[in-house]
Image (cartoon, rainbow, N blue to C red):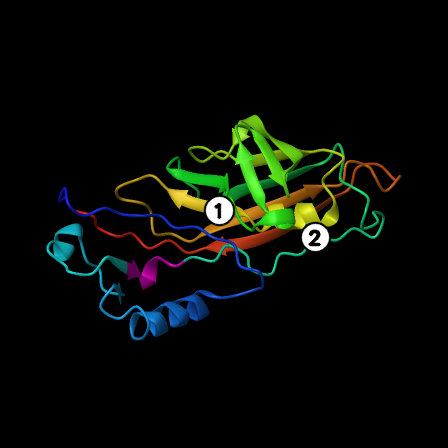
Amino acid sequence: PTPNVSLVDFKFTTKRPTTKEEINKIISTYVGGDLKGVMGAYSEPLVSSDFNHNPLSSVFSLEGTTVIDGNLVVADADITASGSFNGGFLQAALTTNGTSADQLSVVATGSGGTAIAVSGTSVTYGGTTIGTIDATANGVNGAALKIALNGSATIAATQALARSIGFSNSSDAPSSLARTVTFTLDDGANGGTGALQGTRTATVNVTAVNDA
């Protein structure tokens, strides 16, 4: 490793469904246009020493782009738009090829009335607390990430939360096997028929980047 080169793990949530290819195309367009000479992009397996004395402010790894689930939709026919998943939970768990270095977290996204944010273990939507991160299922070191939902967890708020779940890996040599993330939503029995659960899976593709 070189002391004058650093790595930034940048996470964000889009306002609509997208793909890795679309994101990389947008980045490449700016790299060759408005940000030419300021930002670069690469797809080769480079290491940190390759960027030593690079005049650019930042360089984007195209192979490092990962989209967890750009199409996740939360719906419940028994709950109105103003109703909630009070007493239920949202959980994301690595169910295939997960490792102890894998991390799941709630990523701060959006702005104003639709912003998802985290303060300690409290998760907020538009400044209002909608849930609490479990003390054990906290997404750290391969653990599942479970958020207990309260009376402010409307369908819109819960969907925004689900789309704000991020993945990262803390290892210097991460496994490049594709991970399966399983989302589980428990409605808290607010439909009047006992607690019901729905699941959805998403694939996370991991590219190991040598930072030597």
Q: Is residue 97 visible?
A: no
Residue 157 position, x and y percent, is 68, 46
For marks 2 and 1, give the CA distance.
17 Å
Tally of numbered discs: 2
Q: Label 2 neighbourhood size at 10 Å, few (<14), some (14-19), many (20+)?
A: some
Q: In terms of sequence position, does the residue under pointer 2 or pointer 1 come before the other? A: 2
SS at mark 2? loop
Q: Label 1 neighbourhood size at 10 Å, few (<14), some (14-19), many (20+)?
A: many
State the image quarter where residue 43 is shown: bottom left
Give, as a single range, the part of the protein colored magenta: 60-65
Q: Pointer 2: what residue?
A: 74
Residue 12 highlighted magenta (yes or no): no
Q: Pointer 1: what residue?
A: 166
Q: Is residue 39 visible?
A: yes
Left or right of 206? Residue 119 is right
Residue 168 position, x and y percent, is 40, 44
Residue 26 position, x and y percent, is 41, 70
Residue for point 67% across, 56% down: 73
Q: Name the disc covering residue 57, or none.
A: none
Amino acid on which disc 1 is placed: Gly
Residue 41 position, x and y percent, is 27, 65
Pick the front one: 171 or 82:
82
Left or right of 195? Residue 19 is left
Q: Is residue 60 above or below residue 134?
A: below
Residue for point 54% across, 36% down: 118
Residue for point 29% across, 74% down: 32
